[in-house]
Image: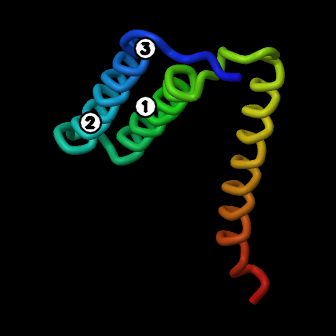
Amino acid sequence: MEKSAKGFPTSHVIGFLFSLILTFVAAGVALKTSLSFTVIMWIIGSLAVIQAGLQLFMFMHMTEGEDGKTNIINIAYAVFVAVVIVLGTIWVLTSGHAAH
């Protein structure tokens, strides 16, 4: 049976505010700076990774549960699968012209 949450969800509000701040910083970097495209993309990508981690811990309760190791293993596997899919897609799309 689940525990009922009592009180104001302070951690959720803080996580939401940090997510908004990170989003606005990324938008500001993209729209208001004269940095090179590559630097802007690295900054936005870094902020996106930070925001994903923030949401995992603030909203998806990664630190809660009986066994913290299981959550870490699941996240590591999900990251591995995502990297394989993205890099595999890039590899197939960029080297497909060599066969013709």
| Vertical arrangement, residue 98 with respect to residue 94, above or below | below
Looking at the image, residue 17 sits to the left or right of residue 5; the answer is: left
Quadrant of residue 66 in the image?
top right
In the image, what residue occupies the spot 35% across and 48% down? 37
Which numbered mark, 3 or 1, is in the foreground of this view?
3
Q: Reading the chain from its start, which is encountered first: label 2 or label 3?
A: 3
Give the amino acid at mark 2. Val
Give the amino acid at mark 3. Ser
Between the C-alphas of marks 3 and 1, the distance is: 20 Å
Q: Name the spot of residue 26 as percent of width and height, x first.
A: 31, 36
| Vertical arrangement, residue 95 with respect to residue 91, above or below | below
> Mark 2 Cα within 10 Å, few/some/many (few <14, many 20+)?
some
In the image, what residue occupies the spot 43% across and 14% down? 11
In the image, what residue occupies the spot 41% across and 21% down? 12
Q: Name the spot of residue 9 as percent of width and height, x first.
A: 40, 16
> Mark 3 Cα within 10 Å, few/some/many (few <14, many 20+)?
few
The residue tagged with tag 1: helix, strand or loop? Answer: helix
Residue that lies at the very extreme toward the left in this rendered image = 32
Which numbered mark, 2 or 1, is in the foreground of this view?
1
Looking at the image, residue 36 sits to the left or right of residue 99; the answer is: left
Q: Which residue is mark 2?
A: 29
Between the C-alphas of marks 2 and 1, the distance is: 11 Å
Between the C-alphas of marks 2 and 3, the distance is: 27 Å
Q: Quadrant of the N terminus?
A: top right
Determine contact: label 2, label 1, CB under 8 Å.
yes
Q: Which residue is mark 3?
A: 11
Q: Which residue is mark 1?
A: 47
